[in-house]
Image (spheres, helix red, strand yellow):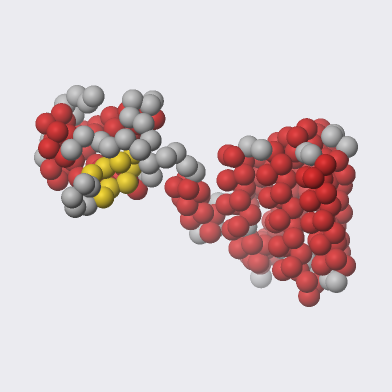
Amino acid sequence: MFRAAKQSRIFQDIVDQIQEAILDGRIKSGDMLPAERELKEMFQTSRGTLREALRVLEQKGLIEIKLGTGGGARVKSANTEQIRESLDILIRSQRVSLKHLSEFREGAEGDVVALAARRATVADIQRLKELLQDAKEHAEKGVSHRDDFLEADKKLHLAMAQISRNPIYISILKMVHNNINRYYDNFLHMEKRELMENYEDLRDMVQAIEKGDGTKAKSLAQSHIHRFNGYMEKEKQQKKDE
């Protein structure tokens, strides 16, 4: 199953070999890796180096290690949790610039609403309209309901992602919208005018999705994200100049 590890980069080579065996299906989800003694012989390495390589694979979410009788390293089912956790940290630490966040969202969310326009069911449209009504009520009440409006806004964006039926978009956009408030709190000044403008953008997107017009839905989503990012960039610059 495995060859002796390259001595010049033995640790990384062990990680790479096991990872490739898992990703190309030679080792299936739920399978146990060979016992530690066998792996040491296959890779011709020390126990310490092998265990460190297995810990890296565990951190990547590819295996889980159980100690004791009947223990060992078992291949985990593929999921996006580890990826989402890494991206969570990146967004929450605000190491992503407003420009890069906007570029990503314009691309991803533009595609999402275009897919939603093609795939939405009657029940999906009804759900979007219910969330839209909630957003409208909060926007009309003004700045005192800013946080409630932003929560309704998040639910609408995530509902659109769900309608796309694409698990990658769903997972990554959930991560983005669960953490984006840190940027809003620092850089997005929202009085009633901005709240109503945001609501109207959402309303127009939902209408385009209901009509099955993916091209228009995508254009509206991208324009909305670009415009509100411009507001945040302006606020950021003003704070910098003070």
Q: Residue furthest bottom?
A: 144
Query: In this picture, is 223 found above or below 149?
Result: above
Query: Residue at image x 49%, y 43%?
Result: 80
The reply to whether residue 90 is visible in this rendering is no
Q: Foreground: 118 or 149? A: 118
Q: Foreground: 61 or 183? A: 61
Residue 67: where, in percent of width, then height?
Answer: 22, 52
The reply to whether residue 11 is visible in this rendering is yes
Residue 161: where, in percent of width, then height?
Answer: 68, 44
Q: Foreground: 224 or 34? A: 34
Query: In this picture, is 67 found above or below 18?
Result: below
Residue 141: where, in percent of width, then height?
Answer: 85, 71
Side of 190 where 20 appears, left or right: left
Q: Residue furthest front?
A: 70
Query: Residue at image x 82%, y 67%?
Result: 138
The quarter of the rendered structure image containing the C terminus is: bottom right
Q: Which quarter of the figure has residue 199?
A: bottom right
Residue 165: where, in percent of width, then height?
Answer: 66, 38
Query: Residue at image x 73%, y 45%?
Result: 160
The quarter of the rendered structure image containing the N terminus is: top left
Q: Foreground: 32 or 178? A: 32
Side of 150 where 193 appears, left or right: right
Query: Residue at image x 73%, y 62%?
Result: 150
Q: How many marks?
A: 0
Side of 35 where 60 appears, left or right: right
Q: Which quarter of the figure has residue 18?
A: top left
